[in-house]
Image (tube, rainbow, N blue to C red):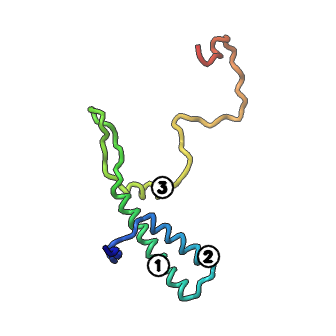
């Protein structure tokens, strides 16, 4: 039986696209290709990169997020909301502020006298 040729509608796997993209980058970085061949490889790389991004976006849409547990012990799943992730990334990154925490004063606190029992961590 003759081999089936890949049709233009059939997309290569994500992994094979990444492998080919890595090879293109190596070829271009080596600098042994002519201008026309380099441009052709670059164009192929851009197409592969777009395909990889599209594949990742499709996979992200399929992710389900664990929302909790039902009474029978089975997980409650919700669809992944990519927009929620994007909204959170817009927020400023910073340190958490803990509630009720006071700034340390510059004065040295005097040690309180207490019995040995109070100084033990576990009784």
Residue at figure coordinates x 35%, y 62% from the top left: 58
Q: Secondary structure at mark 1?
A: helix
> Whole-percent x and y of residue 46?
47, 76
Residue at figure coordinates x 65%, y 16% from the top left: 119
Q: Tell me which label, 2 or 1, sits earlier in the chain.
A: 2
Give the label on residue 29, or none: 2
Residue at image mark 1: 44
> Whole-percent x and y of residue 6?
35, 75
Q: Secondary structure at mark 2?
A: helix
Q: Residue furthest left?
A: 72
Marks 2 and 1, how far apart at CA: 15 Å
Residue at image mark 3: 91
Give the label on residue 70, or none: none
Can you tell which of label 3 and label 1 is closer to the viewer? Answer: 1
Please say if 106 is above or below 120.
below
Q: Tell me which label, 2 or 3, sits earlier in the chain.
A: 2
Q: Quadrant of residue 66?
A: top left
Q: Tell me which label, 3 or 1, sits earlier in the chain.
A: 1
Quadrant in which the N terminus is drawn: bottom left
Marks 2 and 3, how far apart at CA: 37 Å
Q: Secondary structure at mark 3?
A: loop
Is 73 left or right of 112, judged from the image as shown?
A: left
Can you tell which of label 2 and label 3 is closer to the viewer? Answer: 2
Q: Residues within 10 Å of mark 2 (few under 14, many from 20)?
A: few
Quadrant in which the C terminus is drawn: top right
Residue at figure coordinates x 54%, y 72% from the top left: 23
Is 107 left or right of 54, judged from the image as shown?
A: right
Is 31 left or right of 60, judged from the image as shown?
A: right
């Amino acid at each position: 039986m003759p081999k089936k040729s890949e049709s233009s509608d059939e997309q290569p796997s994500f992994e094979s696209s990444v492998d080919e993209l890595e090879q293109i980058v190596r070829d271009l970085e080596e600098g042994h290709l002519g201008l026309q061949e380099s441009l052709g490889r670059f164009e192929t790389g851009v197409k592969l990169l777009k395909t990889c991004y599209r594949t990742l976006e499709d996979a992200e849409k399929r992710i389900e997020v664990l929302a909790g547990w039902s009474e029978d012990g089975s997980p409650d799943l919700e669809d992944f909301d990519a927009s929620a992730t994007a909204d959170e990334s817009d927020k400023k990154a910073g340190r958490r502020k803990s509630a009720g925490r006071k700034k340390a004063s510059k004065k040295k606190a005097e040690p309180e006298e207490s019995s040995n029992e109070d100084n033990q961590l576990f009784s």
